[in-house]
Image (tube, rainbow, N blue to C red):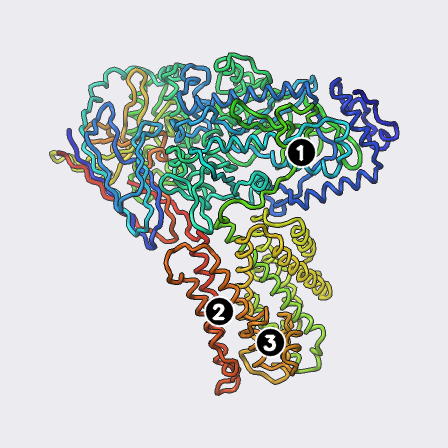
Amino acid sequence: MHYKVTHSTVYQYNEPVSLCHNLALLKPRSTATQICHKTQLDITPLPDIINEYEDFFGNKATYFAIQQEHKKLVVTVTSFIENTNTRASLFNFFESAAWEEAKKHIADPMPENAEIRQYITETPMTTYNEDIKAYALASFTPGRALFDSANDLMQRIYADFRYTPGFTTIATPVADVMKRRRGVCQDFAHLAIACIRSLGLPARYVSGYIETVPEGGAPKLTGADASHAWFSIFIPGTGWVDFDPTNNQIPSFQHITIAWGRDYTDVTPLKGVILSSGKHKLDVAVSVTRM
Amino acid sequence: MTANTPEASFIEHFLNPNYSYAEFVGKDANLQPHWNTFFNSLSGFSPSDIEARRQDIFRMLRENGVTYNIYGDPSGLNRPWNLDIIPYLIDKTEWATIESGLVQRAELLNLILKDIYGERRLVRNGILPAELIYNHIGFLRQCVGVKQLHQRSLILYSADLARSTNGSVWVLNDRTQAPSGSGYALENRITMARVLPELFNDLQVRHLSAYFETLRQSLHEIAPVKKQDTRIVILTPGPSNETYFEHSYLSTYMGFTLVQGDDLMVIDNHVWLKTLGGLEKVDVILRRVDDSFCDPLELKDDSKLGVPGLMQAVRSGNVSIANPLGSGILENPGLMPFMQSMSRYFLNQDLVLPSIASWWCGQPKEMQYVLDNIQSLVIKKIHKVSRASTSVDGASLTEKQIEDLKQSIKAHPYLYVGQEKISITSTPSFINGKIEPRTALFRTYLTSNTYSYTALSGGLTRTAPNNNFLISNQLGSISKDTWVIAPEDEYRTIMPKDQIEVVASKKGDITSRTAENLFWVGRYAERVLGTARFLRTVMRFITEGNRHSQSNDIETEQHLLEALTHYTVTYPGFLEDAEKKFANPWSELNSILFDEQRSGSLVYNFRLFCRVVYAERDHWSTDTWRVIWSMENVLKGTYASDTTHIRALNVLDSIITSMVAFIGLNRESISREQGWIMLDMGRKIEQCMLLTSMLRSTLVNKHDEQVDYNLQEAVLKSNETLVNYRYKYRVHIQHTLVLELMLLDPNNPRSIIYQLDRLKAYLSNLPKLQDGFSLQPHEKLIFEAYSLLKLANREQLSTPDETGAQFKLLDEFLEKLYDLLFNITGAVSKLYFKHAQKQKQLFSAESF
């Protein structure tokens, strides 16, 4: 499947900004299941400085600075992605391994486990408590396969939580999301990650896009016209497997990965520091088009 | 050289009778003779001599402004530093072990640091558990892969050491981010050498200067580009940081500019310093700001102490930071149990100085050991997440607390380390007139040199206020000078004495922050002085006038009190509830004087004055400090409620005298021309604004002739111009002449035209930030104000309007003048003080 993704972010400032530093994680990486054929970042005004590099997680980072006064900043990324979707064919291999076994396997101090185990530690955005752990244990029952447990957790979050834009902010702790049972995709991803980490298993946060107009009268997927987020678990012998609790779906054709990390803070699509005393207004537009 | 034990009379006088002399000096056969020598020197002093010297120490530390700030305690700001007259002694054999052990440890930590942010062989080869690195708050993923330009990334290293009762020296903590204390160690030494030089006579105490000289060279060597005038700055979190004194002290001692985060900016992937004359490129940053606070773009996004984009400048190889960002990973007690194997791995050597026995709970067996032995261990967290102490002595906990701690360990085992508790030897300490044993820790410092590391031959020793295991400056402790008793190494003859070498002329322009602070020092100084003078005039009038019999005096007094409210901007003040307040003005007056919480009060303004004075502490001479403290002392303990007006007038007199002295001293001693210009500009602006405000509230309305006379006289008095007036005019005080003298007379140093004339000259001396001949905004404004005065006509201003009750033209004139003055300060700060624009975070869409 081939997609063209356009993602544009517009900041309008009340007062002129004399200097801005920005860090963008907007260029999609290539993964086992997707090829990023071309990706281009267009920024106005033209930045004085652009540094491109790979971050610790292998994501494509772009730093740019605008060193002249401006009242508007437009950042548009256009990417051409081929979704190879090799995931579906792998399902059979890991259905049977119990989650406790997987946990033991990952705990083994083999060098290749070192990088994976960093995703077990809770972060400020995925701090768990007893409630969260209890919620997780209802899916991760003794002896159940890791894949099945995670799949069940995803389904329960989908069923038990209401997708409510505007109810939470970036700063809402997962404990609140757990209690009030509402949120948006990043809350659900963080909650699932907190659940999984509370059991001592690794889980990571994935930022990306989702195609919003499906073929053939299928129901419209939630999360339209914006970037999206979901979670991923590590299954020994297979690798990382994604789950989208917002749409109760194992990402296949319609999900496009941009970046991954321990939580949102590792993969914030665009952040910046400006020198200004005034307020600003933000507009974001995303379109995912099948080619 | 062997010396006998000191005389019995000395022992009798000074030693706490609960201990024997032998217990004090300990069992170390190498140290005993040194202690004998030391105490023999000390026994040459009588008890009153010793007390006098202790007071000298205290005074000298205070006069040098040596302070330590305590977090979370408002009165803890700038707490004086404590120094024991008895040093901590280390003999040459022991020092040789310590020095070689620390150099080895520094080399090892450097290799570990380079590996963690480079190839990560330690983790991949299973020498270090991944969790210990990846879960540590000091591991900055942003720093992985940053090019390592030098053989030694770790420039500074500091270790907390303790001598145990069995005589061995242990490393308790490694400090690798921004180790503090070397400045205090130096100041302790200088103080001891000045106050008690006799004590050094018979002992060969190593000098400290080699370390600082090496540090200076080392910082020059890491500059990304070799050039003549390498710009090195010290990055401080600011005046409220606990060790700000030291930042400022080192900046003076080393000759590096002291800066805060927003003094710097990143442009074109380079770091620049904002100065009065524009931007200057920075090559090396000696940082005292913690890792994660250094860059709000990539690291902690709510940090106000950092420089946005700094990581990019580092990645681009355009700036070097000592220590490099990310070095906080080494401040990790979890590494202790692995130090020996890492030393074998990297250096193929055993550790010279053993680490204290430690068990990292991230391993099941070790965790079980810690849980089983929790009461006999010290439990530490692998990193600090708040200012709370990260260590706890298991023995000091209640059963409930132990249960809670065990639960926490089980929940997050990788966060905890158990450490063996060693029994630390005590050292003789002078406490309340007696010598008593106290446990002591000492910290020493290393810096990289071309070939390896150089250790400070000395350090900072701290003793517990009582015999307690945990010692921390935050909890209160007494410091000691640390004497390494050994002949100097031959190559260490660079600077023979520990002398403060004040670098009088730092290169380049002053930073724009310093400019702004000094400008405000000038403004607040005048505000305090003006307020004090006006208050004094008003209070004297009240106490000396016939307020109960003369209706004129009563009316004058009421106008003066109202004017005072306007002048100090302490509304509503005497404008509300006026009748009651006129009947007894003292409580309101005392409040304007002493109410610290009240904006506009004398004490409030004095606090603002102190804040900027302390922020620029290296600008003030010892004499100046003495004047500042005398004002602090006068105001300390004076409260609004229990002050008689006689006492209040005394306070005002002494504040006025001191503030005049403060200003006068600075004219002579402030080290740099630009600094004085900024300070005096602030004074001039403030004087103009205050005087304009005073004239508007006293001379604009027409009253009874006698009342007007009184008011005019009060204006002259509180501006110290009455004598001048009499000398010049030799006539009765008149409205027209008062106006002429205070506004238009270019020969009266208190007139507004005089101040504006000076201001104009100062402004034309400031660096030009734009080319061309057209005037800059502040220059235009000052010309406008100047011409307004030059073109003014005293007769017109002094002509009442048609109602006969008001000098309307004067009122309009003063209002216009005030607005111009106000706009001048705005224009100056916009152009020269580049902090006006606040740093703000931007995020993309917050939810989807």
How far apart marks 2 and 3 lie (CA) works out to 21 Å
- Residues marked 1 and 2 touching at CB (< 8 Å): no
- Are the residues flagged by discs 3 and 1 from a single subunit? yes
Amino acid on which disc 2 is placed: Tyr
- Are the residues flagged by discs 2 and 3 from a single subunit? yes
**Residue for badge 2:** B818
Residue at x-position 61% and y-position 21%? B99
- Are the residues flagged by discs 1 and 2 from a single subunit? yes
Q: Which of B122 and B758 is in front in this view?
A: B758
The mark lying in front, picked from 3 and 1, is: 1
Tell me where residue B87 appears, x and y as whole percent.
72, 30
For mark 3, give the secondary structure. Answer: helix
Which of the labelled discs sits on residue B559, or is there none? 3
Tell me where residue B581 appears, x and y as whole percent.
63, 71
Amino acid on which disc 1 is placed: Lys
The N terminus of chain B sits in image quarter = top right
Q: Nearer the viewer, residue B772 or A2?
A: B772
Subunit of label 3: B
Q: How crowded is mark 1: few (under 14 residues within 10 Å), some or many (20 or more)?
A: few
How far apart marks 3 and 1 lie (CA) works out to 63 Å
Amino acid on which disc 3 is placed: His
Q: Earlier in the sequence, mark 2 or mark 3?
A: 3
For mark 2, give the secondary structure. Answer: helix
For mark 1, give the secondary structure. Answer: loop
Q: In the rendered view, does B833 fall on the left or right side of A84?
A: right
The C terminus of chain B sits in image quarter = top left
Q: How crowded is mark 3: few (under 14 residues within 10 Å), some or many (20 or more)?
A: some
Subunit of label 2: B
The mark lying in front, picked from 2 and 3, is: 2
Q: Nearer the viewer, residue B206 or A63?
A: B206
